[in-house]
Amino acid sequence: MSTKPPSGTRDFLPEEIRRREYVVRVVREVYESYGFEPLETPAFENIETLLGKYGEEGNKLIFKILKRGEHEASGEADLALRYDLTVPLARVVAQYQNELPRFFKRYQIQPVWRADRPARGRFREFYQCDIDAIGSTSPVVEAELLAAVSDVLGRLRFESFEIRLNHRRALTALLECAGVPEALHAEALIALDKLDKVGADGVLKELLARGVGDTAAQAALAFFAGTKEVTDAAEGLDRLQHFVRGSDAGRAATEDLRSILALTAGTRAHGRIRIDPSLARGLSYYTGAIMEIAVPDLAGSLGGGGRYDNLVGMFLGRDVPACGFSLGLERIIVVMTERDMFPAKVSTGAVDVMVTFLTNGLRADALKLASELRAGKLRVEVYPEVSPKLEKPLKYASGRNVPVLAILGEDEQARGEVTVRDLQTRKQEAAPRATAADWIAKRVRIS
């Protein structure tokens, strides 16, 4: 019998969990500093809640749950695992509309599931770290979201990252101006969303396969080719505005983008933004600005989001403006681990001091000393077995990356002392037993 977890899922060992908790703590602190409040929703939803919200590609990746009991033989599904955190949020807003504030700002850090093909940094079960603002069409919302996620990455010591920014209505106008028929816009967006993965030739083949004419496909791709290397946001926006100048919707969309750019000038997002007309974001519920964060030498993004003013209305019967951004916890951890970006304390053990005793008669005093140390907010482990020669506790403490070993032996007891060994410098000192907890705590905090 195989002991491996299912493909696309993982077991998390202690060191990995410390890294995850560190990133989540930073994300939570930043999100709360912007006034976002926590929310949690069930791991699974009614299947009709999820179907039809993610487009053709997304619907194929929903993990469906078969009916149970007497209905099991039907092979039909009535529930599904959560695909993302945005659609459940829209359902919550509709359900609790009278209990939520007019402007509802929430963050949510929970796992989602997708029946995707596993790859490096891509899993079937993974965590998302979402922030969303409900109730306003102001571009201040987009600017705050970009500032918040930029603050998160800054706190996590990401030095090189880029925010790709586009607009769904600008994309629509671009397709119109390139000559793509309106009936084929959805098909064209699915193909264009793969530009970074399959390149221009691959997208051209898919556009043609989806019924887009060669002239229109070539015109759209020619525009993207001309803007791909433009890094200055203002220049990229000017190029886009010029191309869609014949479309009222296109002009309005580029003005939205110009407002967002201006509003981020005083935030950490400033200088990180690049207007990328090829950015499509595969999910069909986006209606306005769309954004994505990329880092050098990483296939895929660290996260993305956008405005979705019609999604809540699918549950409520009237549209409610909304905009959100999702950071991918797994992608962030993969990059930080590979590039050695975690602080040393995160990677070391979860113990500040280990207490060991040299005779069974000192077991009770070892537990008492550990309690005194814990009262001083230290993380303490007691080595559970007698080891007169210290070989085993020293080896164990080294494997656990414990910095300090407190030793209780008969000689120490006779002198009213505790021997304290620094396992990094190998220096030993004697501490009075009566004040040993405070004495050790000071040494640990200094180191």
Image: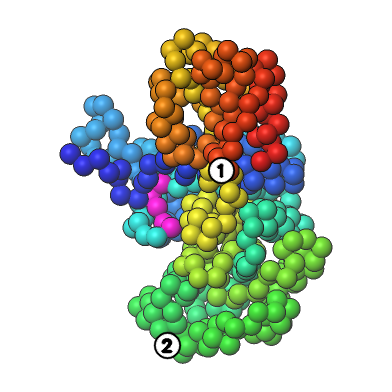
111 on left or right of 40: left
363 in relation to 112, above or below: above
* Residue under label 1: 424
The verdict on residue 46 being magenta is no
237 on left or right of 195: right
Q: On the image, which quarter does residue 378 sit in? A: top right
- Mark 1: secondary structure: loop
Inter-mark Cα distance, 1 to 2: 68 Å
Q: Can residue 256 be seen in this view?
A: yes
Nearest to viewer (mark 1 / mark 2): 1
Residue 306 in the image: state x and y as whole percent.
61, 59
46 in relation to 225, above or below: above
* Residue under label 2: 214
The verdict on residue 123 being magenta is yes
**The N terminus sits in image quarter:** top left
Which amino acid is tagged 2? Asp
